[in-house]
Image (cartoon, rainbow, N blue to C red):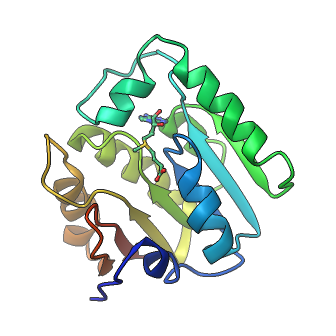
Amino acid sequence: MKSPKDRKAFFELFPKHGVGVEVGVFEGFNARDHLIPVCAPKQLYLVDSWGVIDEQDHGTDWKGVEANHPSGRGDLRYVSVKEMFANHIDVHILRSYSHAAATLFKDQSLDWVYVDANHEYKWVKRDIEAWLPKIKPGGFMGGHDYMEYRGFGVIHAVAECLVDKGHNLVAVSQNKHPDWLVQL
Ligand SMILES: C[S@@+](CC[C@H](N)C(=O)[O-])C[C@H]1O[C@@H](n2cnc3c(N)ncnc32)[C@H](O)[C@@H]1O
């Protein structure tokens, strides 16, 4: 297994010029600083609910909780992310719940999906299960916060939904909030 030293080195493991999705965008900095310059995606889809309250409970991911607080900050972040990528014709912003957005994609149509939304076990599991069929054979699924912290369930969900089913954990990065990567 590889241990890239930081997030930039981690995203260098992704295939270049692919069709990719980031699930959980927040203020767009990961897309701006890593996904676009490092992965150079042919098409990039950015999926976030940005605070639309629906069936989702708040979970324990502090950013998810904050973003889902009915304070209007989600709206501001959504507008700011739209402005950030306004000149990128290959960046598509989807304000949607993760599992609903996944239904918009054909099976085996994506080169990679990076999951960084709600980090509670049941939501990570739901995200993995929703997006996994959408990725091409040989493609990649990754995510953030592969760590035991404040009720995060990322390690548990990745083990149960991917590794125990025979998918190869190809990398865990060394940054303080580690990223994980599985090849399908
Ligand atoms: C940890 S932040 C994302 C950070 C971003 N990937 C980065 O590295 O800068 C989590 C985001 O996931 C979003 N989120 C949480 N649960 C979600 C869900 N079920 N569907 C869509 N977005 C969700 C929140 O609105 C929040 O903006």
Q: Is residue 45 above or below residue 120?
A: below
Of 176 and 122, nearer the camera is 176
Q: Residue at x 47, y 15 (%)?
A: 53
In-image side of 26 versus 145 (left or right): right
In-image side of 90 versus 64 (left or right): right
Q: Residue at x 37, y 35 (%)?
A: 63
Of 13 and 27, nearer the camera is 27
Residue 75 placement (x, y as % from top left)? 62, 21
Q: Is residue 133 visible?
A: yes
Q: Residue at x 14, y 40 (%)?
A: 151
Q: Is residue 62 above or below residue 178?
A: above
In-image side of 59 versus 48 (left or right): left
Tag count in the figure? 0
Residue 9 placement (x, y as % from top left)? 45, 82
Q: Which quarter of the rendering shows the C terminus?
A: bottom left
Q: Is residue 110 visible?
A: no
Tell me the quadrant of ligand 1: top left
Q: Residue at x 31, y 76 (%)?
A: 173
In-image side of 97 versus 89 (left or right): left
Residue 159 placement (x, y as % from top left)? 19, 64
Q: Which quarter of the picture shows residue 134?
A: bottom right
Of 71 and 143, nearer the camera is 71
Q: Which quarter of the picture shows residue 79?
A: top right
Q: Which quarter of the rendering shows the N terminus?
A: bottom left
Residue 165 placement (x, y as % from top left)? 25, 69
In the displayed orientation, state which residue is furthest to the bottom: 1
